[in-house]
Image (cartoon, grey):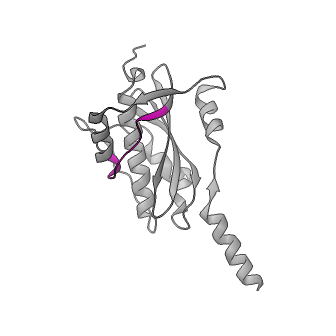
Amino acid sequence: MCLCLLLVSAHNYAQETQRIAPEDYRAQYFGEDLSSQTLWVSKEQRGHIEKIVEHSFNSFRVRYWGQGQRTGWIFEEIGKELPITVGVIVEKDRIIDLTVLEYRESRGGEVVYPFFTSQFLSARLKEGRQDGLDKSIDGITGATLSVRALKKVATLALYCHQQTAFSQVTQ
């Protein structure tokens, strides 16, 4: 009976791991007082977003934070069965941080660790394209769908960043 309880509690722990609260993540890169911005999604942008995420995108707006040439995004993308909440900070059209804020899957949790997420640092969109990263991201055995979800989120954040005035700012 003790073994069963241990297995159930281990499964529940692996299934939902909150790494950092979204408001704490935002404050880390933008301070406490920055209010959110809204990216209103046009029909053309929706088509690009759906190509990136490989499924329908029904939202008319995306909330984000912006300051200078920096934007911050929090997206959820399904891994195998459950959503993975990911924070992405983009500055000067490059990813400067990608952090898994909450991981809910029972497998593939290695994607939350810096040894994996650091691969996204300095990633940009492919030259002349808006549907992929300009660098290769190594996969993790047993976490293929979670890795794919994080690649989609990274690409989506870079694309959305380019749709804002914060991408156009020169300093």
Residue in the image at 35% along x and 49% along y: 53
Q: How many marks?
A: 0
Q: Residue furthest top?
A: 171
Q: Is residue 92 above or below residue 108?
A: above
Quadrant housing the N terminus: bottom right
Of all residues, the one furthest to the bottom in this rendering is 1
Residue 92 location, x and y as percent? 41, 26
Q: Residue furthest right?
A: 2
Residue at (55%, 54%) from the top-left corner? 112
Position in image of residue 89 (x %, y %): 49, 35
The quarter holding residue 48 reads top left
Indicate whether residue 151 is drawn in magenta. Answer: no
**Of the pair 136 and 43, the residue shown nearer to us:** 43
Residue 19 in the image: x percent, y percent? 63, 50
Instruction: Tell me: 164 left or right of 117.
Output: left
In the displayed structure image, the side of residue 170 where residue 5 appears, left or right: right
Q: Compared to 165, does 75 lie above or below?
A: below
The magenta stretch spans which residues? 52-63
* Left or right: where 17 falls relative to 44: right
Q: Residue at x 49, y 33 (%)?
A: 63
Q: Residue at x 38, y 34 (%)?
A: 160
Residue 84 is situated, as x and y percent measured from the top left of the image, at 51, 53
- Where does the C terminus fall, quadrant-wise? top left
Compared to 143, does 90 lie above or below? Answer: above
